[in-house]
Amino acid sequence: MMDRLRELLERDEGCLKTVYLCSELVPTFGVGHAVTADDPEHGWPVGAPVSDHRVSVAFQQDVKTAIADAMWLHPDLADMPEDAQITIISLAFQLGGPNYGFFVRHHAAIEIRDWIEAAAQLRNSKLYRQTTARTERHAQRLETLA
């Protein structure tokens, strides 16, 4: 599952080995890693190169956080089909656990394994309007579980 997750996240986020500004104008590098004040890259200029090792370390930390957030939102995550796990972790990675937690109806549908409704709730969101293609892929992945 981890290989599929990394492949999906790299496709959705890209993997740039330089500091760049994301769509929210936040300094970012690697697989969508937003630079924080605790990062060694804090304060680096846009375009500064980032090593393969650092990209890998940041990605592993971010995935670990996303998995923890996904498990906080859905303690039974490990009992779900792999496609559901990947979708939930990917959304936690993209949004962060607290923001993803606001998708109350989506999570309620997941809890009762109503994958069609979970997908519909993704489509009925601001996220869908902002990242339509990516969110549609998530919705379709959930629908295949129905």
Image: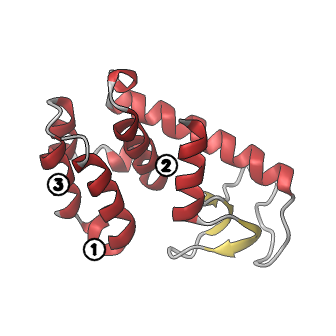
Q: Position of residue 139 (x, y in %)?
A: 27, 56
Name which residue lies at 56% across and 76% down. 25
Q: Secondary structure at mark 1?
A: helix
Name which residue lies at 58% across and 37% down. 2
Name which residue lies at 50% across and 40% down. 66
Amino acid type of disc 2? Phe
Q: How is the image coloured?
A: secondary structure
C-beta proximity under 8 Å, tags 1 and 2: no
Horizontal placement of 61 versus 120: left or right? right
Amino acid type of disc 3? Gln
Q: Secondary structure at mark 2?
A: helix
Horizontal placement of 117 versus 133: left or right? left
Answer above or below: position of 76 versus 122: above
Q: Badge 2 is on which residue? A: 93
Answer above or below: position of 20 versus 81: below
Residue 129 circle label: 1
Horizontal placement of 51 versus 35: left or right? right
Q: Earlier in the sequence, mark 1 or mark 3?
A: 3
Q: Badge 3 is on which residue? A: 121
Q: Earlier in the sequence, mark 2 or mark 3?
A: 2
Q: Earlier in the sequence, mark 1 or mark 2?
A: 2
